[in-house]
Amino acid sequence: MRHRTAIAIAATIVSVGIGSHAFARDLTVVSWGGNYQEAQRKAYFEPFMKATGIKLIEDSWDGGIGTLRAKVQGGDVAWDVVQAEAEELQLGCDEGVILQLDWEKLGGKDNFLPTAVHDCGVGAILWSTVLAYDGSKFPNGGPTSWADFWDVDKFPGKRALRKGPKYNLEFALMADGVAPADVYATLATADGVQRAFDKLSELKDHLIWWEAGAQPPQLLASGEVVMTSVYNGRLDTPRKEGKDFRIVWPGSIYAIDSWVILKGSPNVGKAMELIAFMSAPENQKNLPPYISYGVTHKDAVNGIAPDVLSNLPSAPDNLKDAIAIDTGFWTDNIDELNKRFNAWAAQ
Amino acid sequence: MKAPDRHRLRHQTRRQERVRALRALVLVLPMFAFLALSFLVPIGRMLYRSIEDPELASALPQTAQLLKQWDGVDLPPDNVFAALLREMPTAFEKRTLAAVAQRLNHDISGYRSLLLRTARKLNKREPSATPLDAAQAFFDIDPRWRQPRYWAAMRRAAGPVTDFYLLAALDLDRDAAGDIVPVPEHEAVFVDVLLRTIWIGGVVMALCLVTGYPIAYLLATASPRLGNILMILVLLPFWTSLLVRTSAWVVVLQNEGILNGLFLRFGLVDAPVQMIFNRFGVFVAMTHVLLPFMVLPLYSVMKGISPSYMRAASSLGAPPWLAFLRVYLPQSMPGVAAGCLLVFILAVGYYITPALVGGAGDQMVSYFIAFYTSRTVNWGLASALAAVLLLTTVALYFVYGRLSRTGGGVRLG
């Protein structure tokens, strides 16, 4: 009996060992979970499997260069294609944690928005941090700019901003009259940073700080605040439920998430095929109907219905007075500005 | 019994005892090994991470070596420039330079892009094209290389160990001459945060004690039927997810929430009272979340206090309050001590609750540890903050142990 058990255990160990090492594993794609990944499943993953016959496994994550580092340095790379934020793209590329892409297979860099092009990644979506307000609170017309966000006499009520310096210093400068295009040049100087903090101080008593992306729509819905900064896609659900939440696009700050391939992936060829599929305009146009995130291929815009397009951060009208987040500025300065923000907040 | 027999017997007994002790040791060995691996090793590693400084020395070994020989006055000698010029392209190709850039950026903001941009430009240069001196090559790429502070920062990072992170965790820095100085006032934040953490922990502990003591007393003295119901009421929140309980407080305390709605309806206030996203909200939510950790140890101690002592006190003429103060309270002190310690130590490590119901000025040390661990990947500073928090907690524990021993024979556990 004992003998047979030992054989069974040995057999299990051997077969598990073979299972994980002898055969190449299936192509694995990693995104951000929730409604968003569901939308991607319908628009990209399932059509890709049908079109190519390649089996695709999904996983999800919450970002962080540390996670990618650990995967690659651990040797057993379980992920192939990952949707990364601009920061992880830059750091990962510098550190060699992610591979350079084969842009030939993607049809060349010129077909994409300039900000969606990187040696190690191609833009997956364009999302935006916007000013949003509850239309029912302002029957005579709501705010139209960050200057209005700061105008507590004209638009009384509390406001919410994301905890931390990122985005808020930019918004403060725009409220103080700095043109969107000059925001990062101004922030690069000590005087500009001081000016941003001074402007934030004006509004300090009227501010509530949010932490998680799900909070601002709740704060608006509960009436805790009358306007807030928010990730644009988070407004989809409350709006479908009938809330009159409106977006002010001028002065919004957009960012691009990119598809990257982890170094050490055993499926580089298939991974490139998947990324090419998800970057093709005829496939990209299928995502926005599910969730209000913008597309990165210049031709994808043509296939999107006008009422969907008008809600996307990548719609030309919405992009007009928006700025791209300066990842280089923030990777250089986040440590110092975060300390300064927290010292300021505690005053 | 003769003497040699007795001797042998004693010898045998001793041997048996040794065998038994050994067997017991073997039995607890797995647990010791588990504790060492899952607890001591990671904590030791974390503490070491707060002083180790390996990036520069491993990516640019010769430069690091030469930097350590430099006295740190003005600009470094030419051999440092030459070594860096020689080693930088290789480190850039091998992708190890990014880690150095990250490390240096923790010291001076903007150093990251300066170093990587310089490396990129050096790589594009024809190796044989310009035989000019090494220092000039750097000055041509970026004038910042003329500033001694960038070289001083590099010298500080030459490893293998550093006090940079620990100093930073205490709002201190080294100036160009190497003396320890406080950081500029608008960047001094961590000492404030540490004091805030201890203060919030202390207030929450006191609130838990004040509210938890009567509950525990009721639990311990009520009839078994009522006791069971009360116990479930205490334990039910204990079993609920922390996130759910915290979110529930948002619903109750917010401006258009349940409490403010009642206040407004009964005309107690004219405008909603701000009770959340500030310190008040943190106190309320944390006290609620941590209350079971106070009630349960109190209850277990109170359950063991015989009611006959109180009866004896009243039969000797003590009024109820005096009997309580002189008889009941001292006997319940071990529970008070254990509960307070448990709540305080859990409270100073709190992260999610203050993040969700606190304002920007209510964040505790753990918030910053998480921030530096996952957002900016400054693990040295995260470890240093964790080390400072750990050492402060241990120090407070010893002070507490000393106080409670002198203050009336209280023993823990």
Image: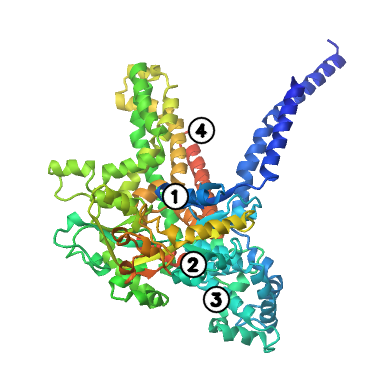
The secondary element bearing badge 1 is classed as helix
User: Mark 1, residues whose alpha carbon is within 10 Å: few (<14), some, or many (≥20)?
Assistant: some
Question: Given the current orientation, which residue lies at the most extreme right position?
Answer: B4
Real-space Cα distance between discs 1 and 4? 55 Å
Q: Is residue A191 visible?
A: yes
Mark pair 2, 1: CA separation: 27 Å
The earlier-in-sequence mark between 2 and 1 is 1
Q: Name the residue carrying label 1.
A: A37
**Element type where label 3 sits in the image:** helix
Look at 20% across and 44% down and name the residue there: B260
Give the residue at mark 2: A331
**Amino acid under disc 4:** Arg
Amino acid type at mark 2: Thr
Residue at 17% of width from left, 43% of height from top?
Answer: B263
Q: Quarter of the image containing the N terminus of chain B?
A: top right
Colour convention of the picture: rainbow
**Front disc: 3 or 4:** 3
Q: Is residue A5 placed above or below B360 in the rendered structure?
A: above
Kindly identify the amino acid type of the residue bearing the numbered disc 3: Leu
Crowd band around label 4 with a 10 angstrom C-alpha radius: few (<14), some (14–19), many (20+):
few
CA gap, disc 3 and disc 2: 12 Å
The percent coordinates of residue A50 (x first, y second) are 51, 48
Q: Which residue is mark 3?
A: B114
* Spatial separation of the CA atoms under disc 1 and disc 3: 37 Å
Where is residue A321? Give x, y as percent. 32, 71
Label 2 element class? helix
Viewer-side residue, B399 vs B214: B214
Residue pointed to by mark 4: B411
